[in-house]
Image (tube, grey):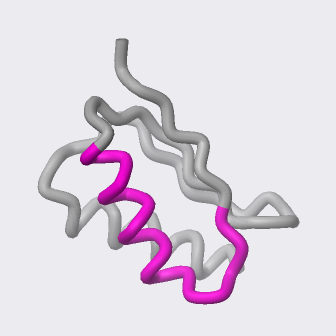
Amino acid sequence: MRALAADIKARLYTTLPFFMSTLEVEYDGEAICVRGVVRLPRERALVMNEAGKMAGEAPLRFELRYRQ
């Protein structure tokens, strides 16, 4: 699961059309947790879709916050 979390993080950094200055993807024992700061709801949806494609059936948890 930790390897999958690293693959998801690498894919997010390389495929997203915007830069996320704060992005953490790690396995916490229960699920792969994706944490970060986004600016727009569209960016949040892109992160969730890309991570979901990579994760397949693995459990995901998102803790995405909006920049103020």
In what quadrant of the picture does the C terminus appear?
top left
Q: Position of residue 30 (x, y in %)?
A: 85, 65
Q: Residue at x 30, y 59 (%)?
A: 46
Furthest residue toward top: 68
Q: Position of residue 51 (x, y in %)?
A: 46, 69
Q: Quadrant of residue 55?
A: bottom right
Does 48 appear in magenta? yes
Q: Which of the two residues, 36 or 40, is positioned nearer the viewer here?
A: 40
In what quadrant of the picture does the N terminus appear?
bottom right
Q: Residue at x 59, y 51 (%)?
A: 62
Q: Residue at x 27, y 46 (%)?
A: 43
Q: Which residues are magenta?
A: 42-60
Furthest residue toward right: 29
Does 64 appear in magenta? no
Q: Residue at x 16, y 47 (%)?
A: 18
Q: Which of the two residues, 48 or 36, is positioned nearer the viewer here?
A: 48
Q: Is residue 2 left or right of residue 43?
A: right
Q: Is residue 54 left or right of residue 30?
A: left
Q: Position of residue 38 (x, y in %)?
A: 34, 35
Q: Main secondary structure of the magenta part?
A: helix
Q: Is residue 9 left or right of residue 1?
A: left
Classify 61 as above or below 67: below
Q: Which of the two residues, 65 or 3, is positioned nearer the viewer here?
A: 65
Q: Quadrant of residue 48?
A: bottom left
Furthest residue toward bottom: 56
Classify 68 as above or below 25: above
Q: Position of residue 41 (x, y in %)?
A: 32, 39
